[in-house]
Amino acid sequence: MQSTQIDVKEYGYFAGNQWRSAVDNQVFEVHEPYSGKLFARVAAGSRADGRTAVDAAAQAFAGWAETTPAEKARLFLKASEIVKRRRGEIAEVLARETGSTISFATFQQDLVAATLQQVAGWVYLPKGEVLETNAPGSHSIGVRRPLGVVASFTPWNGANVLSWRAVISPVAAGNTVVVKPSEFAPVSAGIMLAEVAEEAGFPAGVINVVTHAPGAAGAIADEFFDRPEVRVINLIGGVKTARMLAERAGRLLKRTVMELGGFNPMIILDDVDMDYAVRTATFGSFFHQGQICLNTRRIIIQRKIYQEFLGKFVARTKSLPAGDPLDPKTIIGPIITRDAVKLIDDRVKEAVARGAKAHTGAKHDGQIYYPTILDGRSSGCRHRQRGDLRASRHGRSGGHARRGGCRRKSHAVRSHVFDSRREYLQGIRDGTESPRRHRECEFTDRQRRDSRANGRRSRQRMGPHGTPQPG
């Protein structure tokens, strides 16, 4: 299937179950990452438009909070059926607007439909608990109640499924929502959701979407923070943005819910199933062009198997077809913006200049950046890179490799350790701790004092590089 130019659609923003133009009638243009063609014109919302959306959500809150579970479940199930019916249409929007391959875009629709079905059961979950009390013959009851308006900032990567994730939980709990989608994916990360919610019959003001042009997010965010009706800030995005939002929310005592990007290592030890490790490394590294928070950022391999793994990894990576995201055969689609392509290319060139070796890729065609594998210590990840770039390095032993993967532990979202020896993996979670630390955690306070008093005996119990020894 080839991308074709069709009539360019113009979208308003959605508040109070009405599609609205921006107060000044301004729009901004969204272009397809792959072809560069104009994809849509979208309302360029301002602070005044954000105010309209918050007003609608605040007005709807009291009624929605008292809506019965049966009615909520009916609406969620209706939305699920709509997503199933519009599966192909919404998937094509995702592919054209964000460069998501059609297979990933279709997967998102299936996941959204399944989650909407699941949430229909969540509305019946208990909303309180019986609490212990010191008063004889009595008990206390704790009841959970919805908070109010939730402002949700939704991203461009995984745009459709993540926008629904930012809406489903708060709405199921009885809150109302204002979605502010990324300017790079206003249709996929917001408007499609609003269309489904409108067709499903959600009451006016329960789900609202306010769009904005590049560089204009700050004014809408100001409205969110200044309004006392907005009780929660919900972000799916990057650490830099999260820090700014969390700081402002803290000053105003607004609650925050944040799902952030990370630096995710994969550690491969020497008794691994090599072909499985290569397949997983390829998928983890280059899925959605390396632009999602769970992508593998660095691969650390024990020296004994390093060359074997690298050779197979490079060969498999070179076989990945790149091109039109609407073509079902495509695995590598375009990077979201030209600026992102330049950032990747600059960092590849910097790494190579510092001594890294590029085994494949290190080039781009338009916004297609070919999957790139760098190795050597000089490729050390000074940046949290999003895009088709992976660094690999080797470690002398299992313990050394694990500690190498833990150095950026504060940014880890997910880490993978490939090793058949289960005892080494106990407690090594999310790349945050080493085997030495886990052995020490088994000591009692007295044993710790004894081990410090007899450092030699303690060292004898630990092998090279902190690897636990029997006994």
Image: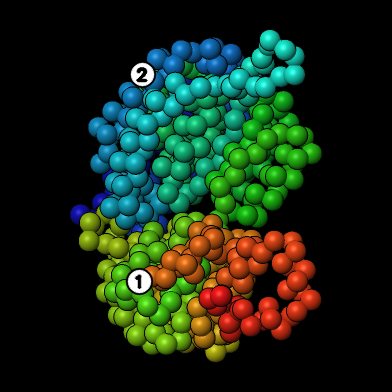
Q: Is residue 446 left or right of residue 33?
A: right
- Cα distance between the residues tagged 1 and 2: 44 Å
Residue 130 locus on image (x, y percent): 61, 20
- Residue for point 54% across, 63% down: 428
Looking at the rendered structure, which numbered label has been put on residue 74?
Answer: 2
Q: How many marks?
A: 2
Residue 212 locus on image (x, y percent): 56, 40
- Residue for point 71% across, 84% down: 456
Identify the amino acid type marked 1: Ala
Give SS at disc 1. helix
Looking at the rendered structure, which numbered label has been put on residue 277?
Answer: 1
- Specify the quadrant that holds the C terminus: bottom right
- Residue for point 73% across, 73% down: 451
In terms of depth relative to the viewer, which is nearer, 316 or 154?
A: 316
Residue 163 locus on image (x, y percent): 46, 39
Give SS at disc 2. helix
Q: Label 2: how many residues lie within 10 Å, few (<14), some (14-19) or many (20+)?
A: some
Can the viewer see residue 199?
no
Residue 360 locus on image (x, y percent): 38, 81
- Specify the quadrant that holds the N terminus: bottom left
Q: Residue furthest top?
A: 137
Is tag 1's residue or tag 2's residue first in the polypeptide sequence?
2
Q: Is 213 rendered above or below residue 115?
A: below
Q: Is residue 2 left or right of residue 140?
A: left
- Residue for point 61% across, 79% down: 462
Identify the amino acid type marked 2: Arg
Q: Is 302 rendered above or below residue 135?
A: below
Q: Residue furthest left?
A: 1
Asked if disc 1 and disc 2 are in contact, CB closer than 8 Å, the reply is no
